[in-house]
């Protein structure tokens, strides 16, 4: 048990049956020791320095250093928001933590709020996560009943209120400023930056937005120290990560593993390899908004820098196998249809560019494509690069398309009528 705890800070409390861990059992397994230690032993700035030294990077996909993000918050009056609006196709890691370990997330929120001197925190939850909503509300009420949340937590001068807010179901709410607009009751469009949320966020006050998995790491870092957290990784990137494989694999799922484990180990040792009768055509390392990689890339360490050097992103760490029986044009049509539908329509390149891509892919699927269609797709990709749209939605949507044309151009050419 001790060894497991030392190597699996996120999931060690779960047994095989994976029933939700509520307050009684969470306290039995050292729950809230991290929060108590943080509030009674350290100053807010000392907590931020510990998180900086731990090397914890955001687990929502971008990988921005968490401690640095916290240090940017002005502590006059600030808000903490937990981004639990998980809508990336093929991704369900936050759902696992939300449903099974609600107190671990809440403990992370308490510590982060103390470090930022926030007196109010929100959990912005994907509306479809009904079980997560029920379990988080139950956990919050357990704490309120025990007077472990609200005024003077652990008999200190620190007080905090946590509110759960369920979203109406828009992918763009994963973008932090669109999330803030939605929380304020406005249309979920991204905001122009600067000012960044760290100086002007929710209701114009300094705001920090952190992902579920990021905040769930905080209690164990405070309890065990930053050296411990750095040493449980196999990579220069610290800690563990919720990772998984889906698609035609024998054992699809999500597991907590050290950053730096290779994709092949993840696929063969945990997902038990690809199903009989299928072979690997490509794989997406971290959700639908990442670039395709090939079989030759499976020996890459699953960490931020290694995947980036290979031309993709670690993203959410939930990989998807593309097998040999999948047509890439059909797959891309499904992916781009999703991103086109979920565009908020705020900027013209995204609003018009993504439907244009869908229209071309539909023609290629019907083998009615024009001779210049592939060049047109490439040109649209160039027009929607980072910096040319209001937020990262369109550049993320184009990542799989650009890499599919790079590796599987022949499948796009088969949809063209040559006269």
Image (cartoon, grey):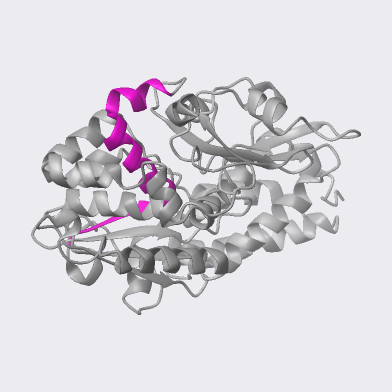
Q: Residue 187 sits in which quadrant?
A: bottom left
Residue 347, visible in the rendered structure: no
Q: Residue furthest bottom?
A: 185
Query: Residue 275 appears at what percent x and percent y?
Result: 84, 35
Residue 218 covered by magenta stretch: yes
* Dominant SS type (magenta): helix
Residue 166 point in image, percent of width and height: 45, 72
* Left or right relative to 193: residue 141: right
On screen, 362 above or below 267?
below
In the rendering, at what x and y percent does residue 265 appear? 65, 23
Residue 154 sits above or below residue 186 on the image: above
- Start and end of the magenta stretch? 206-232
Residue furthest out toward the right = 277
In this rendered view, identify the residue nearer to me: 402 or 111.
111
Which residue occupies 35% across, 79% down?
Answer: 185
Q: Is residue 418 left or right of residue 68?
A: right
Q: Nearer the viewer, residue 139 or 243?
A: 139
Residue 347 highlighted magenta (yes or no) = no
Q: Is residue 236 visible?
A: yes
Note whether 184 is above or below 402 in the view shown: below
Kindly identify the residue that appears in the image at 17 percent across and 61 percent down. Answer: 78
Decide if residue 260 is on the left or right side of residue 181.
right
Q: Report x, y in % for residue 173.
A: 44, 65
- Give the residue displayed 48% in from the left and 69% down from the top: 344
């Amino acid at each position: 048990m001790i060894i497991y705890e030392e190597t699996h800070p996120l999931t060690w409390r779960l047994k095989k049956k994976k029933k939700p861990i509520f307050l009684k059992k969470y306290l039995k397994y050292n729950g809230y020791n991290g929060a108590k230690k943080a509030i009674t032993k350290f100053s807010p700035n000392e907590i931020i320095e510990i998180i900086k030294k731990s090397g914890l990077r955001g687990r929502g996909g971008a990988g921005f250093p968490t401690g640095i993000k916290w240090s940017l918050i002005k502590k006059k009056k600030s808000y903490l928001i937990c981004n639990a609006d998980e809508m990336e196709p093929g991704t369900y890691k936050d759902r696992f933590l939300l449903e099974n370990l609600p107190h671990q997330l809440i403990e992370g929120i308490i510590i982060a709020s103390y470090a930022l001197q926030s007196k109010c925190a929100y959990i912005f939850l994907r509306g479809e996560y009904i079980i997560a909503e029920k379990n988080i509300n139950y956990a919050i009420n357990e704490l309120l009943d025990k007077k472990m949340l609200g005024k003077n937590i652990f008999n200190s001068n620190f007080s905090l209120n946590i509110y759960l807010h369920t979203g109406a179901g828009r992918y763009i709410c994963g973008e932090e400023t669109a999330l803030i607009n939605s929380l304020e009751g406005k249309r979920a469009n991204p905001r122009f930056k600067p000012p960044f949320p760290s100086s002007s966020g929710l209701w114009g006050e300094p705001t920090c937005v952190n992902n579920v998995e990021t905040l769930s790491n905080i209690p164990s870092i405070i309890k065990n120290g930053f050296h411990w957290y750095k040493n449980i990784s196999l990579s220069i990137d610290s800690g563990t990560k919720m990772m998984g494989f889906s698609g035609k694999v024998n054992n699809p799922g999500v597991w907590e593993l050290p950053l730096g484990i290779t994709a092949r180990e993840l696929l063969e040792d945990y997902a038990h390899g690809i199903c009989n009768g299928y072979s690997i055509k490509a794989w997406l390392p971290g959700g639908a908004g990442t670039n395709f990689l090939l079989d030759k890339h499976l020996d890459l360490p699953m960490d931020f820098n290694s995947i980036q050097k290979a031309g993709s992103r670690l993203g959410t760490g939930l990989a998807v196998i593309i097998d040999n029986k999948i047509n890439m044009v059909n797959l891309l049509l499904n992916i781009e249809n999703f991103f086109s539908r979920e565009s908020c329509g705020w900027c013209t390149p995204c609003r018009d560019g993504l439907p244009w891509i869908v229209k071309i892919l539909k023609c290629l699927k019907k083998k009615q494509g024009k001779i210049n269609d592939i060049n047109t797709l490439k040109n649209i990709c160039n027009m929607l690069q980072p910096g040319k749209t209001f937020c990262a939605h369109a550049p993320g949507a184009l990542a799989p398309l650009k890499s599919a044309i790079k590796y599987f151009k022949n499948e796009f050419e088969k949809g063209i009528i040559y006269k």
